[in-house]
Each structure stands twice: as structure tokens, then as C-alpha cells.
Image (tube, grey):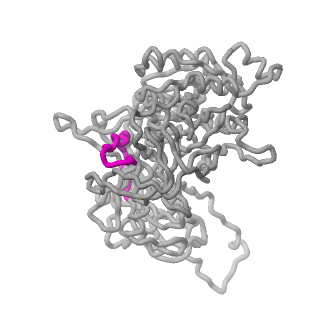
Amino acid sequence: MQDPKLIRNICIIAHVDHGKTTLVDFLLKQAGTFKQHQAVADRVMDSMDLERERGITILAKNTSVRVGDTKVNIVDTPGHADFGGEVERIMGMVDGALLLVDAAEGPLPQTRFVLRKALSQGHKIILVINKVDRPDARIDEVVNAAFDLFVELGATDEQADFPIIYACAREGWCTKNSEDVPGLISGELKGSLQPLFDEVLKVIPAPKVAEGTDFQMLVSNLSYSDYVGRLSIGRVLSGAVKKNQRIIRRGVDAAGNSANENFTVTQLYTYEGLKQAEVTELSAGDIGVIAGTELAEIGDTFVGNESLAPLPRIQVEKPTLAMIFSVNTSPLSGKEGEAIQSRKLRDRLLREVRQNVALRLEETQFNDQFRVLGRGELQLAILIEQMRRENFEFMVGKPTVLYKSGENGERLEPMERAVLDLPQTATGDVTQMFQSRKGILTRFEGGSGHGSNRVRMEIDIPTRGLLGTRSRFLTLTRGEGLFSTQFLGYGPHKGDIPHRTSGSLIADRSGDTVEYGLLGLEDRGILFIGPGVPVYEGMIIGEHNKDNDINVNPCREKKLTNIRAAHAEFLVTLSGIRKLTLEQSLEWIDEDEWIEVTPKSIRLRKKVLQQNLRSVKREDRIQ
């Protein structure tokens, strides 16, 4: 059994792209987790393909390192606000946190969110100022801003007296003395992450073990093994559990009533480096994995005997967005992937909701449509992308925000604060875009400290106004802008926000598109597809340059005659096609349209395919 005094449980929290996963890489390497000949990929904790492609952490993951005789369990957490549910549920597993802050950008909205969660749990914090080698680093200002943030969030005197580490996670060194930073950057001094290891052992307390010897564990995460089934991950709060022992799961059923299950522990694992090591016993204070029940859900309590009551279930902030998922009903259904039935779609969404406490699932009045509630556009887009890669075909509707009613019956809507860091030359265009979406500029900083040509803006804006702004923001700033958001709460409804004012170009028949037919449509608007693409009646092929829809024939071929003129056979090509990504499609569609998602394609279509059953006038079709 592991002595609880020789265990430390910590999480690494930070804003997106401040270096959490890179720091974990070097903590593992310098703790001797990998063998000398072992090839190790960068960002080894980002195990999902989507995480590697997007450069962000989506799921919280566990690992551990050995520092002398002490085992340090580490949880790497996401930095994006849409995946805040991952952060909230693992806070109960740890006793302290490493807070990473970029030496140039300073504390950002997600820094505030994750720090508030850690402080509310009473955790001790070690502040790590990362990327101190950046040429625009402003270390002293960032330290002061971090201290102000601690005070603002109500940190106790003990929490506000935090140690500070200056680090360059990419190079694998850190120091407690800011005067050593120039020497470490230049290479005159040699550094490692040993000061950080020492500080963790000194500052982070050993896990508190509840009095009593009976086993008790709160399930904070789930995983799956092809060999032993569902894996329940959590921290053992008291007692110990052995392999083949009979224990009780205290959970809830679909109606929210308490449900108990007796089961036998078939396997026990603990974390050793990146691997799960099989053990015969788990003791209090350690983070471990239990196999034996297929019904476990996040928030359940495992207990050793019937006299122990369940622990309070994990609570997360409520969703702000909703989206309809539907069975694919298009004429091309089943051609590029698996055309799933409503039962299979429901089972897949239920599985996602069980593993992600920030998502919820609701039934609708239609048997083949389901409403998924989530935190933000990116979270829902990631779910769609994951299902695509599992070879599913389905349809999704336009994201809608979740409204509330105030005390006097007034309509309230979710509000967010967007923090923008961008080149000064793009300020006018970006400000105009956000003001047109009911955004209010609350703070503007520029000049020294951010580089002479960069500014930082804070804009309070309805969640409705944020839908689809990320891609436009990157276009306006030529890819140089940084965009992050923080949920503020509910505020008065801000009125109508202008959406797309143009109509759609809609195919009026099935077939394959022909270049000749598309050339005749270029004057009508912007095309989304090129020649040789299968289409069907009701499928959207472009954006009309007027406010009404128009049914067109993109399959029209040139009439053949037996007369030819040499000067008439010149080459004519399409001038340009706008291919929409999934995120751009979610922002573009209206309430009467679907996005058809397959493993190979993303198509736009009308909910009503037959042209004689739908109106082309905007006021008739948008209710």
C-alpha cells in the first residue's frame, strides 16, 4: 500500500495555449518516466487526433511521476472555456494546482475561470510564469496582474501567499529567482524542472484521508477498455479496496432517483507514468481506476458497506447553447458512411452525455431528432467531428441559445466577455463587427506592454452574437488575433442581431453538377461546390445575392449541334468557390436548414426538400 503522506495530487490549469501539455511532457521526461531509447512524441498527453490537429486539450487526462519516494499524480486539463466541465469535475481529485500564465499575455478569461474553481475548493496554488523567453515578455506586470486576480476572486491570505516559478516549458527549465532568467535564456546557466518538483513536494499538502477504514471513492472520470469494459476513475477518499472485493455503487437512474448496485471489483489500476499499472489494492489518497460495473457514471460514489451514504454529486455550470441532432433523411443517405437509425443516434449521444457532465440530452416531439445542450459552439463542433470519424451520417440544425425568464417575466439571455488581442491595424474592422452584434466595448489597452502595434480589447456581448465570429475575427486580423471568452451570466435580451440577409441557391433536381451549368449561376451569387459533385432537390449549392431563395439547375449541360465556330470554343472556368468548414456552416445556416454531416462531406440542405412545398420568401420561411 502507498503511504498517503508520500502522495501528491495536483492538476495543471491555464488558459488555452499557455503551455500546460508541453510542461507535462518535460515533467514526465525529467522524472525518468521514459526509457533512454524510447521515442516520445511532442504533447504526449494529447492522445486524441482532434487534440493534435487543433493544438488544444479537450479531455482531462491522468498521469504520474515519481520524485524520490513520493508519487505525484498529475491531471492535465483543457484550457478552452467550452470544455470547462472537464476542469470542474477533476477539482475534487486533487489537493493543489499549478497555475500557468503566459509571460506576455498575462491572465486571460479562462485563467480566471479555472482559478476560481481551484480557490473555491481551498486548493494551494503554485504560480508558474511560462514562456519567459518571449521577446515581449513582461514578467513583473504579469505577476502583479495574477496577484490582483487572486485577491479579486476572494483568495484566503494563505492562498494569496503563493510561490512563483519562472519557466520555459518548451526548453524544460525553471527557476525561483527571476534574476536567473536572462542567463538561462542565453544558455550561460543550465536549468531543469527540479525547482518545480521541490516546490510541489513542499507546498502541496498530502491528501486528506477521511476518518474510518471503510472504502469510499467518488467517480470523477470514465474510460473504456476492450478487455475489462467500463473503467471508473477517481480518488480514494478513505479506506482501501482489493481485487475481487464486493462493493456498492451509489448512483442515480434516468429519472434522478437514487439507484444502488452491488458488484465485484474485477480489476484495479493506478497510474505509473502514462500507463495504467495493474495492482491488487488501492489505498486512501491515491488516484486509481476500478473495473467491474458497466453502469457507473460520473458523480457516482463507490462504498465498501451499506452504512455509508453517497457523496455530493459533481455540479457543473449549466449549458448555454442547444443544437438539434437528427437522423440523415437526404437522398444521398448511406452513400458515404453508416446511415444510423434513431435508436443508434440516441445511444451514441447518451454515451457522450454520460462521459461529459457539461452536456445534456433532451427528447423532442420527433422520434428521430434529439436536442443536445452544451457550453459553446466549439464543444458541439468537436462532438460532431468525433461522430464523423466514427463513420456516422447524421444532420444538425442551427445552434440556438437558451433563454431564461427574469423575476418580472422579462426575457434573459446568456452574456459573455470576449477578450481580444489583435494588431492595431485591424481594430476598426473588428470593433465594427462586434458592435453590429450588440457588443459593448468595456476596456481598451494598447501601446507599451503589448508591443507598440498590438491592442487588447474586452467586449461584453450576447452569446448569440458570438456564433460564427471566430473565423471572421481570424480573417480580419489575418490570423494574428487571439480570441477568448468568459461566461458572465444572464442579462436582459439585447434585441435582434442581424444574421445572414441573403438567400440560398438551391438545386432543383438530382444529378451531378456540370461546369457549364455552374457558369450560368455565377452572376446569381457565391457557389459552395464545384463541378462533378452529386446534388439532390433541396440541397443548397451557394449563397444568393438577394434576400430570397432561388431554385436553380446546376446540372444543365451545353446543347450539342453539328455546327462549330472556332472562336466559340474558348476555355471558360469558374472564378471562385467558397468551401464552408463545419464551424462556418453552423454560423451560415438559418432555422429552416440542416447541415448534413458524413465522414467525407458537409452538405447544406433545406428541411423541406420539395420546391413546391416551401416558400422562397425569407419572411415566410423564417418563423
Residue 525 in sight here: no
Q: Locate residue 134 relative to residue 281 in the image: left or right.
A: right
Most frequent secondary structure within the magenta stretch: loop
Q: Which of 243 and 117 is in front in this view?
A: 243
Instruction: Looking at this view, name the residue that lies furthest to the left.
Output: 408
Left or right: where 152 falls relative to 180: left
Pick whichever, 396 or 573, lies toward us.
Answer: 396
Estimate the x, y position of residue 312 in percent, counting from the top left: 33, 40
Q: Is residue 180 above or below residue 45?
A: above
Identified at 51% across, 15% down, the residue is: 161
Up-down: is 19 above or below 577? above
Q: Does the magenta stretch include residue 315?
A: yes
Residue 2 in which image quadrant:
top right
Check the image and name the residue furthest to the right. 188
293 or 319, which is in the foreground?
293
Q: Give the range drawn in magenta.
A: 301-324
The image shows residue 594, relative to residue 191, as above or below, that is below
* Left or right: 469, with 490 as reference point: right
What residue is drawn where x is 43% and y is 69%?
328
Q: Where is residue 73 in the image (x, y as percent from the top left)?
A: 57, 37
Residue 373, percent across and down? 37, 50
In the visual, does 575 lie left or right of 344?
right
Which image quarter holds the C terminus?
bottom left
